[in-house]
Image: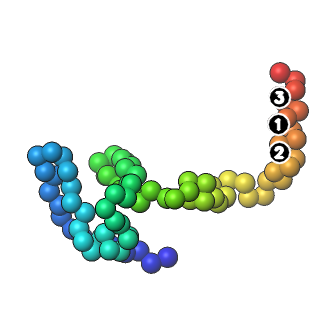
């Protein structure tokens, strides 16, 4: 995976607005009216372009959690536990 990094400094306006630098807008294909997702992690703010489909965006995330697990057997056991409640 190639990481694109643009070192830029922006200033927060009196109305708490930030202008995204042109190079970043062009690289991400951002247009007026696009919706961005804002994530905060400690003292870091991350802006991401909102995906058209969160289902498609999240497909495959945490796949490694299920490595080596027989999902059908797992669900069967879980359903059996529910029936005992």
User: Which quarter of the figure is the C terminus placed in?
Assistant: top right
What element does badge 1 sit on?
helix
Marks 1/3: CA distance? 6 Å
* Left or right side of 13 for 58: right
Mark 2 or 3, nearer chain start: 2
Q: Which residue is mark 1?
A: 78
| Position in image of residue 51 (x %, y %) | 49, 59
Seen in the picture, residue 22 relative to 66 is either above or below; the reply is below
Pointer 2 local density, CA inside 10 Å: few below 14, some 14–19, many at least 20? few
* Left or right side of 24 for 62: right
Check whether the beta carbons of the residues at disc 1 and disc 2 lie within 8 A of each other.
Answer: yes
Check whether the beta carbons of the residues at disc 1 and disc 3 lie within 8 A of each other.
Answer: yes
Residue shown at 82% from the left, 36% from the top? 78
The one of 71 and 35 positioned closer to us in this rendering: 35
Marks 1/2: CA distance? 6 Å
Pointer 1 local density, CA inside 10 Å: few below 14, some 14–19, many at least 20? few
| Position in image of residue 43 (x %, y %) | 29, 48
* Left or right side of 68 for 80: right
Name the disc covering residue 48, or none: none
- Residue at the extreme left of the image, as rendered: 14
Q: Taking the image as drawn, is residue 40 in sight?
A: yes
Q: Which residue is mark 2?
A: 74
């Amino acid at each position: 995976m190639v990481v694109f990094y643009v070192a830029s400094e922006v200033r927060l306006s009196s109305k708490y607005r930030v202008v995204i630098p042109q190079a970043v807008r062009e690289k991400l294909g951002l247009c007026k009216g696009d919706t961005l997702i804002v994530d905060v992690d400690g003292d870091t703010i991350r802006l991401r372009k909102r995906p058209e489909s969160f289902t498609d965006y999240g497909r495959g995330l945490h796949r490694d959690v299920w490595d080596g697990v027989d999902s059908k057997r797992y669900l069967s056991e879980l359903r059996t536990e529910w029936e005992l409640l």
